[in-house]
Image (spheres, rainbow, N blue to C red):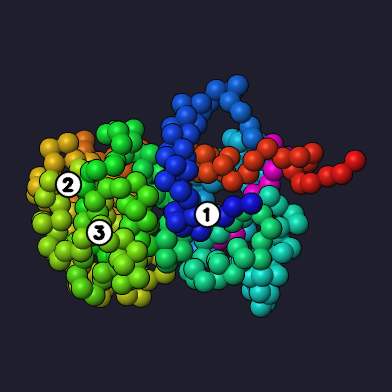
Amino acid sequence: MRHLLSLDDLSSAELHHLIARAQEWKRLRGNPQAPRPLVTRSVAMLFSQHSTRTRVSFEVGIAELGGTPLYLTATELQLARGETPEDTARVLSRYVDALVVRTPDHTWLRRLADAATVPVINGLTPHSHPCQLLADLQTYSEHRGAIQGRTVAWIGAGNNVCNTWLQASRLLDFQLRIAAPESHEPSAEELQSCPGAEVLHDPRAAVRGAALVVTDVWASLGQDGEAERHRHSLAEYHVSRELMALAAPDALFMHCLPAHRGEEVEAELLDATDSVVWDEAENRLHAQKALLEFLLPPPTGNGREVSD
């Protein structure tokens, strides 16, 4: 029984396998002969924050794999009345075969996972967003091949997605340049675990010659009250066509979405030929199918242990 709370829960070989399998699931979509490994399985999606891509891609993916998705919010459960994550995990583990969790508290997620007896998947926390990186890495592989040895430039705040790019760089051996103001650098702990990463304060220096340029909204989910402060401190970290011109001639642009057009990214860049944001968004579906298949091996009997 495995969890995916961050990419650090995977080996390099496992990450390569998931990327390749995600591409296979993409080719199989719509094929009536495609396998349905989640038949008889139920997956609860416990979300305490809004979601478009994560929610829809998981719900559709679970259904296409033959499973039953259950969307739950914290306010609908006894969590709203003080039930602990441990008790919630123990109960839900008796009903469903996996949990996908989106929460503003990564420690809370770890507590829930420690008590769960079914796989727990991080659907986004302030610490990391592993499902997003599975899709990002699949997208790069589809368009440009192996990312190993390439240079990736992250522009903007050192947030949860940036942390996950750090984890990916350790596993897949590519150079990561992070352009962020001092006030928005990734934590010292995250940087120490990835000695190959380089932190710069000049986005032009970070992008120069890069094979991939990545950004995200300046105020992450749950930081709406700090949006104005973030706009002021990150104003110089705007990804424009002019900035992209400093990257490698065949460089790609990624954004995990939702985007604030005209803020962290020039509006027209999202729709440009070197932008792969729509493939990136679609690939959430295929990458998460690969992940669910990986974490939920074929069941015995009805999906739980049975005896004669």
Q: Which residues are magenta?
A: 39-47
Provide the residue designation for mark 1. Answer: 4
Identify the disc placed on residue 154.
none
| Secondary structure of the residue carrying numbered label 1 | loop
Image position of 15 with respect to 193: above or below: above
- Rendered residue at 45%/56% (across/down): 8
Q: Residues within 10 Å of mark 2 (few under 14, many from 20)?
A: many
Provide the residue designation for mark 2. Answer: 210
The kind of residue tagged 3 is Ala
Magenta stretch holds residue 42: yes
Image position of 233 with respect to 43: above or below: below
Look at the magenta stretch and give its main secondary structure: strand
The kind of residue tagged 1 is Leu
Q: Considering only order in the chain, which callout, 1 or 2, is on the residue closer to the N terminus?
A: 1
Does residue 261 appear in the picture of this structure?
no
Q: Position of residue 273 (x, y in %)?
A: 21, 35
Q: Contact (CB < 8 A) between labels 1 and 3?
A: no
- The answer to whether 224 appears left or right of 215 in the picture is right
